[in-house]
Image: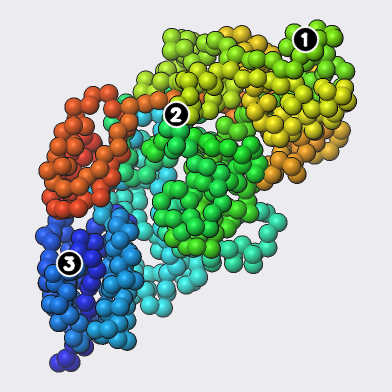
Amino acid sequence: MVKPIPRKLVVVGDGGCGKVTTHSATVLTQSSLLTVFTQGFFPTSYEPTVFENYIEVVDVDGTSVELSLWDTAGQEDFDRLRSLSYLDTHVVLICFSVDDPISLENVEAKWGPEVHKQCAGVKIILTANDSDFNELLYSMRSVLRALQGHLRTFHLVVYDFAFDAEHDAARMPGSLPSSSTGDSLRVAQTPTWLDFSRLNSTEGPNLQYAVHSEIFHLPTPGASNEAVSEWRTKALPSYNSMAIESRLAWLPGLAETSIALNDDFFILRPHSVADFTSALYGNVFRFDKNYYQQPKPVLSKKLFNDAGETSGLVHANHYLSNRFPRRRRPYVLHGPRVMSRTMLDEASIMFADVLKTSSARRFRELKHSPDIHIMWLMTALKVERWREAFLWTYVVANLGAEGVWGTSAREAIKDFFDIRDGEDIEGIQVMRGERWTTNRMRVDKTFHQMGWRPPVRVKYLFSSMDGHLPPIVEPGRAANSTDMCDFELTRCLGPFWSDHLDIPSQDMFKRLAFEESQCGDCLIMALVSASGYLGLSAIFPPQDATYTRPRGTPPSVVPHLPLTPTWQEADFSLASVMANSALPGKVNLRHYTMRLLARYLYVSGATDAQFKGLENPKQTNETLREIDRLKNTAVLGLNDNVEDGEGEVKAILGGWFERRWPKPAPWERTVG
């Protein structure tokens, strides 16, 4: 009998970083590295170890190997004792926790030097560990129950990697397809509970899963295959959630409106579709009202390798501020977010170069370029595109339809602000008028008249039909300080007003929308107030106003304004916009601008949401009991950064999940 080849693996890392609980090759299945190799199953719980070692004979490609696995203690108290574990080691596995930045810093500060000193020349494997409590399974169940009958498709985006036909073919459960090659095969990491034969069940919505390599594309049809291939080689495999989210527009079968959730969020109560979107009010956004939570427009190399959200937020606002006014913008609350395919498409085109670079960042910690928070960017972009379309409708399509702001526009401004000939007025004080758009009784009545269920978990706070999203009041200022403004005629209208010069319509638009953005905001407030309690009658062109578009095939027949990365290079003239987004012939400008604005409708809302952290068994029990007592909480986020008793926490949380959502989804694998 051939004696097995001895091989020794030592596992080191900070205490509590998860050396005993490393991920298996299947997403969302927690496993113990030691238990899997020595006992052949995935454990559901474990006890913390101080020093453990296991020996098992395993078969590796037909060769018998005696694998000796040594688990060590990371605490300083055991430093001297741990040095005894390194003798005759062949491989060292250094672990760190993705939830604990200090454990990653200690890889370089402590574990690397220790390993090189104790057993120089051995192979080192660096492993990132994360805890999993089967949240994805129950997160999907929660959404399925809360929106029962209103969902078409669940999209599950999973990691994949190239299949090594030479080395991995023997591990396949069946034979390889005759037409396949090593280059064409890829391995997808999918949940163990997913039943592939039931993805299109008649019992409920379908489930589609897509792997990263299917959605990592560029919005550049003219790009060479070599250039795209080079970019994909840099971008994949990706471990950066912001990079992955930036490619979601390429999900097969993606609806115009989707709800995007991470697996640590749960919907606790039944919702209506209007809690997320409607044709009447647009997408529903939940903004944080904290002034200091708003990301600044910053491009900072110091933040390039920030592992949190800050880098993606401030850099997204920087590039957004190159295209729109430079200012702080509100943070979108962490939780289920409404995702618009239209806005994903527009962002992918408008910021193509930036997103091409950021989506090639495999890790957030890389220093060569910034992350872009696409979920925040997409939401802020819709807010800005509405504002832009609003001002363009009034300035270009209405007063400037002839291509110039001249005498007729000057008279229209005088009439609008009630300025008599000869009056020397420097400015107009504008007050925000009373509006009924988001009155709860009116909202409910409007939905009922359409035969639709009104929002039940969200209170509408502000509608884009009432203008531009009001800025968050800076601490120390009066609560109503954003309800008034001064429209300074000379500063806002420039030589058109002061010198009676005729100005091209698009130049006046750029002045009001971007160069003097506060003037544009004030003009919006004035126009909305002049429109009365409801509607936007003050901004639209006359009903019979038309533009005759010359012959020629437009790139698109969807009303939209330029998709350039900066406002300076954009051509906002009526002729240019019509040439790129309208069919030849007479175009009714009122109908066109209404369709343009409808593309960007939105409403901001508030809902009862809770975000809780789980730390240890006792605190977990207390937290879950508190959640059960909160009868109005609609959305729950759970941060499972468990510091102690992970196995017990998993059992407690699993029982709570099962009591909350016991009914399996149609695509779940049947147990037993």
Q: In percent of the image, x 52 and y 14: which residue is there?
A: 437
Residue closest to the eye, 12 or 407: 407
Rate crowding at label 3 as few (under 14), some (14 to 19) or many (20 or more) other CA atoms within 10 Å: few
Quick check: 511 left or right of 232?
Answer: right
Q: In percent of the image, x 47 and y 12: which residue is there?
A: 439
Report the residue marked by disc 2. Answer: 475
Residue closest to the eye, 323 or 174: 323
Secondary structure category for the residue under label 3: loop
Q: Which marked residue is nearer to the observer: mark 3 or mark 2?
A: 2
Report the residue marked by disc 3. Answer: 75
Rendered image: mark on residue 419 = 1
* Amino acid type, callout 2: Pro
* Amino acid type, callout 3: Gln
Residue closest to the eye, 75 or 605: 75
Quick check: 245 left or right of 518?
Answer: left
Q: Position of residue 662 (x, y in %)?
A: 21, 37
